[in-house]
Image: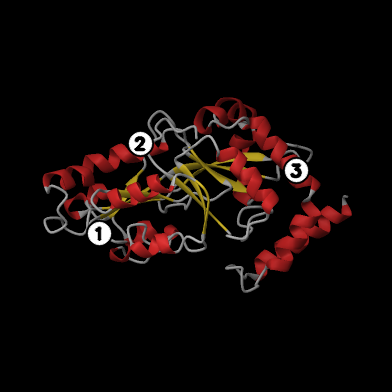
Amino acid sequence: VSQSTQEFIWILFTDPELNQELLDEILDMIKPYPNIFLLGMNNGMNNFRTVGWMQNIKKVFSGDMQMLKDYQKASKHRVLLETRLDADDSIFVEMMDSVQKQAADTMGKRAIESQYDPEKLEKEYRIFCTEHHLEWGYFNPWDKKSEKGHLFGVQHSEFCISAGLTYGYQVGTAKEDLPTVSHHRMSVKMPICKKAANNRNCIERTNPKDYKYIMMRSRTPTSAGMLGVIPSKQVVESDTWKHKQDLTWENLIQKNFAIKPQDIWDLRARLKGSMVNILTDALAGQCTKAEFTCKDSTKKDLQTLLDAVKENS
């Protein structure tokens, strides 16, 4: 809602039978924004351009359906951008504007030159992802008494993270035309656009403009896979980031992401107050049919944290 442009629609997918209390809270937050939709559907990541996508909607909790239909109709004859964002991640305030301009300068120009005719256009896709991101972790390895958690900057020139990952589809190009590659293997399997043949079917780094860390990921015990929740050796031994905490909280979080640091600290306090229940529930949900992750290391980490929390409660 703090993006510098609102020329997009944001679709929130949720369980069609979501708990009413949670549903009411979400609806209250998004009510002022007609371009934000809350849809009850369990497979919304399928091809947005198809008739079947609309048919998969079980319930419409919020949003102007005519606007949604108009966007879907337009997407069939225009370049389509789809950005992925999990509920516990954040993108910088100029993300939409930046990616839209990058796509317009490449795929958009070719679409205009071909008068948006799919018969005149080659199959083309473009994937936008960041090279730098921040991680907010529940635990602070340098100050055990911290009520803020910790911040840590990551550079990853060799892969794409899922937060803010954007797929660009040319007119006439479908999701099925893209190679099946997990996000952390993309840069191995796909060329960087500057080196790609005809500057297409490639990865382009999202233009950070005047920012550096343009995505923020959460590393809390609510994570299904528990990756990075317990600070790694790299984090623990980083003297640089140990001494950059106050500066980063003060100068980057609200500027880059339009989030008040106090809101993050309040969230941590809420997690802390429910930590035993959170960990118990997460442990019980591991390796069930509904959960896509099933790792012994995850169960071990959860049990270790649960034992530690109970011991110190």
Which residue is located at x 32 percent, y 40 percent?
Answer: 100
What residue does disc 3 label?
270
Note whether residue 148 is visible: no
Q: Secondary structure at mark 3?
A: helix
What residue does disc 2 label?
98
Q: Residues within 10 Å of mark 1 (few under 14, many from 20)?
A: some
Q: CA distance from mark 1 to mark 3?
A: 44 Å
Q: Position of residue 195 (x, y in %)?
A: 23, 50
Q: Quadrant of residue 35?
A: top left
Cβ atoms at labels 3 and 2 below 8 Å apart: no
Which residue is located at x 58 percent, y 60 percent?
Answer: 16
What residue does disc 1 label?
173
Nearest to N terminus: mark 2 or mark 1: 2
Q: CA distance from mark 3 to mark 2?
A: 34 Å
- Type of the residue with mark 2: Ser
- Type of the residue with mark 1: Thr
- Type of the residue with mark 3: Arg
Q: Residues within 10 Å of mark 3 (few under 14, many from 20)?
A: few
Q: Position of residue 56 (x, y in %)?
A: 45, 64
Note whether residue 115 is visible: yes
Q: Secondary structure at mark 2?
A: helix
Nearest to N terminus: mark 3 or mark 2: 2
Asked if residue 308 is positioned above or below residue 4 in the image, the reply reads below
Q: Quadrant of residue 113?
A: top left
Q: Position of residue 22 (x, y in %)?
A: 67, 49
Which residue is located at x 42 percent, y 63 percent?
Answer: 55
Instruction: Point out the frontmost of discs 2 and 1.
Output: 1
Q: Nearer the viewer, residue 86 or 295?
A: 86
Asked if residue 38 is positioned above or below residue 173 in the image, the reply reads above
Nearest to N terminus: mark 1 or mark 3: 1
Cβ atoms at labels 2 and 1 below 8 Å apart: no
Picture colour scheme: secondary structure
